[in-house]
Image (cartoon, grey):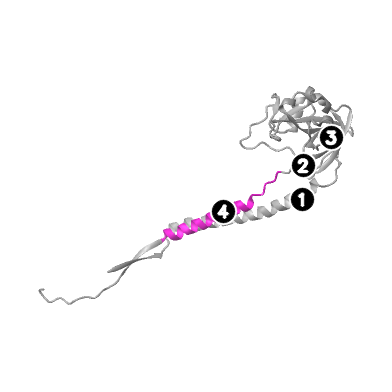
């Protein structure tokens, strides 16, 4: 009589494929944990910047990245006849736009593109929000933002279109016939804070920091995949081994 048992006897091809794959997955999981720590520090620094006291925006920005998310003040004159509309996320269930208006600075610092905030679709016509048309020299407070590159699947801007899909200071300035080279055009956008416009429209923009930190989820996914692959490897490499068990025997007579 024989009994069947299984023993772990891995084959060389399976081992050569599994070990590097598991090592890679563990490395990616560890890298995601490191990214999680980096993102947490970045979010803390950004939070400190946003909550700082506003300072005048320099006429020349040697390092624009050092100014991102910082509160600033600006003084100048809005070029209201050169406003553009940027597609916006719905606000309180309303679809609409964000109004982008160049500001000619009073300190000789050229032009800064200011995002003045949200207007509903039915207030798209400037005449429907005439109270918010600020004439003459004015001062405002805002948050500095860097223009973001287009996403992989995001449609590009069409300079001749009435509504833009993303803020692009260089392309917008060119479409408006404004000088598009620094220092005549600031390489940043200033998002005006709420509560600075007569009549309430455009509504300004609350400080927004969109820095998702999903790296722990990604790390657990990679570690989980590594554990699954190890389990599949171990189970698939358990091979059957037959063990013979001799039971009682009986002598047989010759010729029986």
Separation of marks 2 and 4 at Cα, in angstroms: 34 Å
Do residues under tags 3 and 2 come within 8 Å of each other at their CB atoms? Answer: no
- Using the rendered image of the protein, determine whether residue 15 is visible from the camera's viewpoint: no
Helix, strand or loop under label 2: loop
Question: Going by the image, does 109 lie left or right of 94?
Answer: right
In this rendering, the answer to whether 216 lies above or below 128 is below
**Residue range highlighted in magenta:** 210-237
Separation of marks 1 and 4 at Cα, in angstroms: 28 Å
The location of residue 143, given as percent across then percent down, is 80, 40
Q: Earlier in the sequence, mark 2 or mark 4?
A: 2
Question: Going by the image, does 44 lie left or right of 73?
Answer: left
- Using the rendered image of the protein, determine whether residue 217 is visible from the camera's viewpoint: yes
Q: Nearer the viewer, residue 201 or 156?
A: 201
Residue corresponding to mark 3:
196
Residue corresponding to mark 4:
222
The location of residue 59, given as percent across then percent down, is 86, 37
Q: Nearer the viewer, residue 18 or 62?
A: 18
Question: Going by the image, does 26 lie left or right of 54?
Answer: left
Residue corresponding to mark 2:
207
Nearer to us of marks 2 and 1 is 2
Helix, strand or loop under label 1: helix
| Image disc number at residue 45 | 1
Do residues under tags 1 and 4 come within 8 Å of each other at their CB atoms? Answer: no
Residue at 68% across, 29% down: 157
Q: Quadrant of the C terminus?
A: bottom left
Among the 4 quarters of the image, the one containing residue 56: top right
Helix, strand or loop under label 4: helix
Q: Nearer the viewer, residue 145 or 191?
A: 191
């Amino acid at each position: 009589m024989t009994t069947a048992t299984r023993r772990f006897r891995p084959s060389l091809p399976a081992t050569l494929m599994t070990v590097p794959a598991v090592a890679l997955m563990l490395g990616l999981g560890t890298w995601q944990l490191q990214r999680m720590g980096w993102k947490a520090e970045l979010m803390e620094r950004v939070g400190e910047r946003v909550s700082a006291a506003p300072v005048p925006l320099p006429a020349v920005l040697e390092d624009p990245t050092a100014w991102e998310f910082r509160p600033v003040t600006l003084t100048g004159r809005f070029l209201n006849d050169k406003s553009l509309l940027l597609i916006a996320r719905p606000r309180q269930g309303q679809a609409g736009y964000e109004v982008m208006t160049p500001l000619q600075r009073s300190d000789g610092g050229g032009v800064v593109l200011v995002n003045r905030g949200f207007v509903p679709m039915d207030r798209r016509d400037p005449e429907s929000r005439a109270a918010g048309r600020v004439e003459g020299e004015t001062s405002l407070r805002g948050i500095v933002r860097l223009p973001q590159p287009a996403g992989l699947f995001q449609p590009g801007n069409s300079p001749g279109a009435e509504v833009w899909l993303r803020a692009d200071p260089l392309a917008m300035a060119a479409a408006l016939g404004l000088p598009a080279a620094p220092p005549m055009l600031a390489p940043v956008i200033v998002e005006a804070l709420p509560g600075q416009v007569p009549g309430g429209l455009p509504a300004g923009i609350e400080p927004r920091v969109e820095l998702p930190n999903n790296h722990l989820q990604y790390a657990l996914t990679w570690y989980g995949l590594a554990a699954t692959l190890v389990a599949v490897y171990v189970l698939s490499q358990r091979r059957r081994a037959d063990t013979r068990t001799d039971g009682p025997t009986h002598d047989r007579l010759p010729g029986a």
